[in-house]
Image (tube, coloured by chain):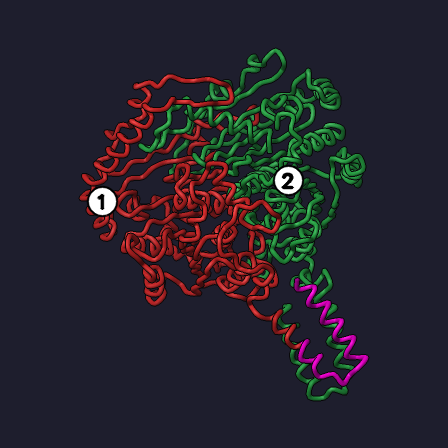
Chain colours: A green, B red
Amino acid sequence: MEEEQLRALLHDLDALKQRPDDPASIDRMRERVVAMLSPASGAASRSKIKDMSAEVVDSNPYSRLMALQRMGVVENYERIRDYSVAIVGIGGVGSVAAEMLTRCGIGRLLLYDYDTVELANMNRLFFRPEQVGMTKTDAAVQTLSGINPDVVLESYSLNITTVKGFETFLESLKARSSHGRSTGVDLVLSCVDNYEARMVVNQACNELGQTWMESGVSEDAVSGHIQLLVPGETACFACAPPLVVASGVDERTLKREGVCAASLPTTMGVVAGLLVQNALKYLLNFGQVSPYLGYNSLKDYFPTMEMRPNPQCSNPACVQRQKEYMDSKPARDAAAKAKMEAEASAANECPVHLDNEWNISVVDDEDTATSSIRSTADVLPEGLVRELPAADLYPEPPAAASSSAIDDDLEELQRQLDALNSS
Amino acid sequence: MEEEQLRALLHDLDALKQRPDDPASIDRMRERVVAMLSPASGAASRSKIKDMSAEVVDSNPYSRLMALQRMGVVENYERIRDYSVAIVGIGGVGSVAAEMLTRCGIGRLLLYDYDTVELANMNRLFFRPEQVGMTKTDAAVQTLSGINPDVVLESYSLNITTVKGFETFLESLKARSSHGRSTGVDLVLSCVDNYEARMVVNQACNELGQTWMESGVSEDAVSGHIQLLVPGETACFACAPPLVVASGVDERTLKREGVCAASLPTTMGVVAGLLVQNALKYLLNFGQVSPYLGYNSLKDYFPTMEMRPNPQCSNPACVQRQKEYMDSKPARDAAAKAKMEAEASAANECPVHLDNEWNISVVDDEDTATSSIRSTADVLPEGLVRELPAADLYPEPPAAASSSAIDDDLEELQRQLDALNSS
């Protein structure tokens, strides 16, 4: 596309050299250069698409996504165009998350970051060396609008941890709020790299009753996590006081003292993938959204856990959301019961397995239903429950395991805490 | 960078309009346009770097990678420059794997694909709409050389499943073979999307005794896997006859009949990340390389297993490599024993835990060492062992679980088979 224009320019220049008295050709060249400079030049490589089609032709950028419907994974893929997602932090995880959602055809993306692109960011996916010096939000909009002009992009180059930045952040989330939605966005993805910014996202989402997902990568680059936070329903980021925080040191100074955290495009790519996959499951209503999922890359171990809200949480907005959630319990129980009864009567009407690859059918067993109801008696007095599977559930590697299991558990716990807190 | 050049061009054009009799300015503009057209123009945004530095400055693209040494994760990160990796299939997984390795500063990348970029590929990461119509290898080299000019890129636009293509594939892998290496590459990553191409990679690697890693994503886009294959030591791709293959149908026709597989940037990004992370662990000698790792995105469940080679394998080269591996057993045993003894004497000299966050120390227990030695008595007569954890090891989700456990197991098994075989 651009190459073509450059070749045409070359041709014009050659012609001009033959006949130097042609001012019209200079104007023509000028137009070409301006077209190449315009931010829309990337986007011009494909026009906007009004309706997502499932047609299987090479020119349809949505065919492989709409195939999710035919495969029975998603009931209505095109609904993705109705959704707005805010991404806070457009770094190694956030930028890749933004690209994934853009390529999936999300309706609207709100991007927040205050930083600029540096060569030191090139060991992670997304940004390119020629974008060095641009704000991360500008560079992201440049790349994303070229990839998919159908996505509405809003970028905010600001620091959400400042008073002014926080106000703008809140206002932008609230804008376009409509019936059935407390804010103008369906989900907030936190992809920031420090504790302070996470607490700010937590504050905003608790105030607004906004569901969000947290992500993080450890400073040694080899583990990470994602977490779902539903104000009032799950633990908020302040509910479980972090055990390991940068012990009184200002995190920002840590970054400047000639010391930097390690990072890898692999770990960050995996965390972004797991994060956006869970965002898609949440938005398009398929599969199971993970409450918490860790990634220990050294062992390819993926711990899961669930955290309930802490009634003594230090965040007043969280406590308020918890109260609202408790108050709405009778209504939720009634709805759940009605749904279960409807499903049970539907199950009695048709066979359990209409058809399967091995022609095996299983008998519906009442006991299965009973055993799947979990006891809620294991709630700690403080209302906090951790369901962290022990690392030794993971099958011991063949022979190479030289360190003891206890050693591994300590390391694993330390790593999870680090991932949760310090980055 | 390019924008600067375009602005300069604009300035020159304006000047020329004022003074049309300046042929030197036309030459200057011509040079600018040629520079922008040259394939190195992207690369020009940063110059090549001779030695990787750990210096923490914004202009150092390797600071976050070299930090892996300071963090104690990798002993010698810069060794990555000595390694060559071949990637077969530059699609949704292979292109992202190539970008990750490029950003990590791998020494040399060999890229194989026969396909061209289409708009229908835009739902996965890496390729951009303006690259539609280019071969995937050319488009990849264009993007990757711009990202990191230090990586030596070799691209092969060919179909490895043809006689001619297979010959070129084998020759390119053998080129630059040196003492201590049977081929010129350290690792082959298979990122192809069909069974036939996997069998061809398997054949080549068995013939050459080349360690490789397999990857795949299911046709419904929601699960995937990676696998390590060491000829003679682990099962090869032909050792375990796939139970579910496209039942006699030519896979290539499947793609043309107005039917297409679903795909997601998330699943493919996660699989690429897990694949390259394991490649880095293998090359740079840290963590544990997974023999097999599955990814079930609906449940965020990650099954692992291990497969030993089948003495009755239909692939003669595999059987030959198995024989060589058995013959070298005494030498390997002696080396392992010597290493274990050296480690044991080192462990006796220093305390088990010098220091840890909780000041807990554990006592070295002989029993721990004994229990970590795994029984090898569970080998099947055919020499085939599957260590697939049951899906119900995964904690049952809170309440939403409506389907029975048996149903889940069948689905899980089907999905794993699909991931292994059909894509």
Residue at 69% from the left image edge and 58% from the top image edge = A48
Question: Gap between marks 1 and 2, in whole Å?
Answer: 51 Å
The numbered disc on residue A188 is none
Q: Position of residue B156 (x, y in %)?
A: 43, 64
Image height of B59 relative to B354, above or below: below
Image height of B38 relative to B141, above or below: below
Residue nearest the observer in this picture, A52 or A236: A236
- How many neighbours does mark 1 have within 10 angstroms: few (below 14), some (14-19), or many (20 or more)? some
Q: Is residue B218 left or right of residue A25?
A: left
Q: Is residue B315 left or right of residue B176?
A: left
SS for tag 2?
A: loop
User: What amino acid type should be assigned to the residue bearing mark 1?
Assistant: Tyr
Protein chain holding label 1: B
User: What amino acid type should be assigned to the residue bearing mark 2?
Assistant: Arg
Q: Which residue is labeled 1 in the image?
A: B325
Q: Which residue is labeled 2 in the image?
A: A256
Residue nearest the observer in this picture, B129 or A75: B129
| Contact check, label 1 and label 2, Cβ < 8 Å | no
Residue interval drawn in magenta: B1-29
Image height of A252 relative to A339, above or below: below
How many badges with numbers are in the image? 2
Q: Quadrant of residue A53?
A: bottom right
Residue nearest the observer in this picture, A339 or B84: B84
Residue B415 visible to an observer of this rendering: no
Q: Position of residue A28 (x, y in %)?
A: 75, 77
By secondary structure, the bulk of the magenta-drawn segment is best described as: helix
Quarter of the image for the N terminus of chain B: give it. bottom right
> Is residue B293 highlighted in magenta?
no
SS for tag 1?
A: helix
